[in-house]
Image: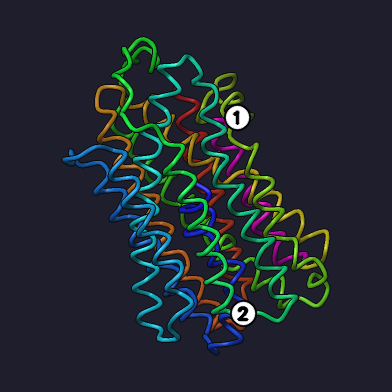
Amino acid sequence: MAAAMGFGRFAYTPILPAMVAGLHLSKAQAGWIASANFAGYLLGALIGALPLRGSPRAWMLSSLAVSVASTLAMGLTPDLYLLAALRFVGGLASAGVLVFASTLVLAALAQSGKAHLAAVHFAGVGAGVAISGGLVSALEAMGVGWAGLWLAVGGLGAVLAVLAALLLPGQQPATVPAAASAAPAKTPAHKADFAKLVLAYGLMGFGYVVTATFLMVIVRGSPAAKAVEPIVWVVVGLAAIPSILPWTRLGRRIGMARAFAICCLIEAAGVAISVLWPTVPGALIAALALGGTYMALTALGLALARELRSDRVSQALAGVTAAFALGQMLGPIAAGILAERTGGFTIPSLVAAAALVMSAILAAMMQRRH
């Protein structure tokens, strides 16, 4: 998860300022390259939902190899079209790793009676974000350019991929009885409620990804916040590592929809603060808000989908994943274009914060009903 998601998917954010300077990228071009990755993620998530031949382990290792190769290749070309194509392939592969690694690991944990350790599995994303952010900051301080940064991140990702291949069980765990692996099915909610969730999940994807893509560019562009540029992305990763467990516990206590709404509002505040208070405290608060919520929102949304459509779980998960992927694909494009026309990321970020608030409102409407 660290190699494919933390490195392969999210390393673009800390490396982006160096790419903008070295390749003279416009904000719109940076947004299009980012969106190519999310388009690949959308396709990968949909493929992962299909009944594929072969073992999940083989699919996971193949996806991981492609993820590492596409990350390394980012440092080998300055061509914008090739960079976008590589980000598309990387997004496709990272989705495959997420789906197939989770299939293997969560089944093994359930079989061994340690399902609570699932949070450790997903913490790999935050760990990868923190490690890659620290690596990029250290190498930039040494004068390494954007191409060298990609090669370094890809090289470390290759080491992690080898470790993952050695540690992953050679056989798929036996099928876990339904009573041990899932909660009892609940009565499906009205279709309108699931439609609200799909829309809320898509808006959340649109809202979070603007800051997740351009936070480092925003910080570098602010003289009052630039002092913490080397650690901001590390803070995002460190905040993400422990985030899922407390939020899912809160969801079980007050309802997944209410927890989702609160989480969205916290992230919306962080997105707005990143541009309305572009200082050292503002940048750190924005980083903490982003890291502490974005993986948790993903988990809460999937749990809520299972609750609302317990009669059609696979279709429900595919539906919300597609909505999320579409939202995060459109977010960087819209933000890049708006930033070009308005001269900065204030308006795009406020639009993203508004999308997160709308997502929270939709979730709160579901909570009242259930």
What residue did someone put label 2 on?
Answer: 18
Distance from the alpha carbon under mark 2 to that under mark 1: 34 Å
Label 2: few (<14), some (14–19) or many (≥20) C-alpha neighbours in 10 Å: many
* The quadrant where residue 32 appears: bottom left
**Residue 4 magenta-highlighted:** no
Q: Is residue 303 above or below residue 156?
A: above
Q: Position of residue 207 (x, y in %)?
A: 52, 56
Residue lying at the far bottom of the rendered structure: 24
Q: Residue at x 47, y 59 (%)?
A: 8
Q: Nearer the viewer, residue 99 or 74?
A: 74
Tell whether label 1 touches label 2 (CB within 8 Å).
no
Q: Which of 244 and 107 is in front in this view?
A: 107
Label 2 amino acid?
A: Ala
Q: What element carries label 1?
A: helix
Q: Is residue 54 above or below residue 39?
A: above
Q: What element carries label 2?
A: helix
Q: Which of marks 2 and 1 is in front?
A: 2
Q: Position of residue 179 (x, y in %)?
A: 35, 9
Q: Is residue 131 above or below residue 139?
A: above
Q: Which residue is drawn at 39% across and 52% down?
A: 64
Label 1: few (<14), some (14–19) or many (≥20) C-alpha neighbours in 10 Å: some
Disc on res. 245:
1
Residue lying at the far front of the rendered structure: 166
Q: Residue at x 59, y 56 (%)?
A: 353
> Relative to 13, is 95 on the left or the right?
left
Q: Which of marks 2 and 1 is nearer the N terminus?
A: 2
Range of residues picked out in magenta = 258-277
* The quadrant where residue 50 appears: top left
> Relative to 340, is 237 on the left or the right?
right
Q: In this view, does 334 lie above or below 268?
A: below
